[in-house]
Amino acid sequence: MTVVTSDDSRRASASAIKDALRQRGDAGRAGQQKRYLKSELDFLGVTVPDLRTVVKAAVRTEQDVIALADELWDDQVFEHRLAAVEVLKAKTALLTDHDLPFIERLIRQAAGWALVDPLSGDIAGRIALTHQGAWRDIDRWATDADFWIRRSALLALLPGIRSNRPDTTRFEKYAVPMLAEKEFFIRKAIGWVLRELSKHDPGYVATFTGRHLKQMSGVTFREAIRRLPEADAERLAKQR
């Protein structure tokens, strides 16, 4: 009699996902995606809706999502890695602060916004909403040498903002030292967080922006004022 282990089951699930993705691939789309994302990964050319359909069917009864995500991530195919991200997104409620080191490893290996942003904004940030211990890792990310990790610290604040639980103290702790950075993806992330904050608290964003006008890059400023009341946006633009 053959004994089926959890490892066997996990590998079978990962293999089924990869096979389903391969069947939905399109070579022309794959080339376009690779050029758009400027990635060294291989691409199958699967649309995001198709990928999510495949993952949704596969994770209905899956419990060991970390192991499944790790199995999917462990090659150089973009859609396999994105499927790993979608597995984690679908089962974030099962994750805790103890899973942050794994998420951090994926962010370091992702080195691109299409994977980094959901890992930080949709997964790490959501974990931190219910497991306060996660902030120990995320606080450390804000001063990491890798700018993708620093970006992730900023984007991890988004779930709290969107659930009307903004942490502006932590935002300023992260963002103010980064305002002078030249890296586009940091500048954009600071602006992105400010834009989301402005939907709930435009007064705070107007005040913060006015206080840091001279330090803000153009891209940060444009994102910060995008959702502000017209009068505030015009006043800040004139001051700048």
Image (cartoon, grey):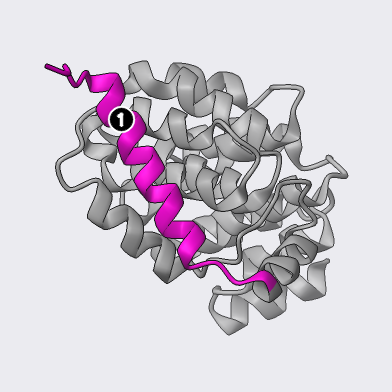
The quarter in which the N terminus is drawn is top left
In-front residue for pair 194/87: 87
In-front residue for pair 12/196: 12
The x, y position of residue 47, in whole percent, is 51, 70
| Residue ID for mark 1 | 10
In-front residue for pair 140/233: 140
Determine the residue positioned at 61% across, 60% down.
Answer: 44
The x, y position of residue 101, in whole percent, is 48, 18
Q: Is residue 183 above or below residue 114?
A: above
Which residues, given as a range, are shown in magenta? Answer: 1-27
In-front residue for pair 201/231: 201
The quarter in which the C terminus is drawn is bottom right
Determine the residue positioned at 40% across, 41% down.
Answer: 15
Determine the residue positioned at 57% across, 41% down.
Answer: 154
Q: What element carries label 1?
A: helix
Whether residue 190 sits left or right of residue 96 in the image: it is right
Magenta segment: does it hold 42?
no
Q: Is residue 207 above or below residue 148?
A: below
Q: Residue furthest bottom?
A: 230
Residue type indicated by callout 1: Arg
The secondary structure that most of the magenta stretch takes on is helix
How crowded is the residue under tag 1: few (<14 C-alpha within 10 Å), some, or many (20+)? many
